Image: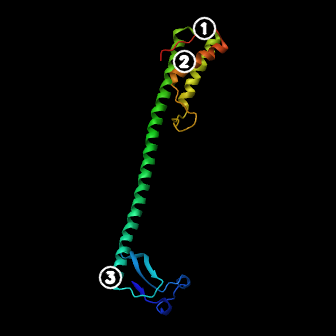
Amino acid sequence: PVEVDNYAGEKRFTVPAIVFEQGIKSGMSVPIFRGDKVIGAMLVHTRTPRHFGAVEVGLLQLVANQTAIAIKSAQHQAELLEAQEQLAAQSALAWMGMAGSTWAHAVTTAAIVIKENAQALRGLVAIKSLPEKVQEKLQRVEEQAREIQSMRITVPLSAEVGVELVGVNAFLRERLPRICDQHDKDVRIEWSL
């Protein structure tokens, strides 16, 4: 601890100008420790000259010690919050990865079923008996199924604006007849997915 009864007569150290500018006459300071290391100081000043006794110095040291504990606790709390945030982010990424894998598997499986159904349809009907436009449409369905299988699929995030999950089977049931109707009115598609 450092006790100064009157800064005007202090000879142990150079008194900062701000002390005189603020009209401070006396003061005391005690170190703030973390273990054996000094991490700061607690100071008390008065504008009237006075002597600080051992009880006052002890009380200030007690407050400084409690301050050190509070600082350490706040730092540990900040470290804990940071660790919790990192864990939450890692967990979210893991869940997103699992959801993405599940979604990718579902889409890929649907594409395989579509391709196999198109191939089975070819096998049920003699290829030469199918009109050329139907053969072309069947070929395009198989190609699109292969394209879907080769795509790198990631699950859309629900937070993305305008993103909506669409069932593959329902989507195909709705869109394929429209596409076929636009090009050839005689094409009829039946799915058992």
Q: Circles 3 and 2: CB distance less than 8 Å?
A: no
Say above or below: 76 vs 161. Answer: below
Q: Nearer the viewer, mark 2 or mark 1?
A: 2
In the drawing, what numbered circle is on residue 55? 3
In whole angstroms, how far apart are the C-alphas of marks 3 and 1? 108 Å
- Rate crowding at label 2 as few (under 14), some (14 to 19) or many (20 or more) other CA atoms within 10 Å: some
Of the residues shown, which amino acid type is indicated by label 1? Lys
Q: Earlier in the sequence, mark 2 or mark 1?
A: 1
Say above or below: 109 vs 133. Answer: below
Q: Position of residue 37 (x, y in %)?
A: 39, 76
At 32% across and 82% down in the image, what residue appears? Answer: 55
Q: Nearer the viewer, mark 3 or mark 2?
A: 3
Say above or below: 60 vs 160. Answer: below
Asked where in the image residue 35 lies, by quadrant, the reply is bottom left
Q: Earlier in the sequence, mark 3 or mark 2?
A: 3
SS for tag 3?
helix
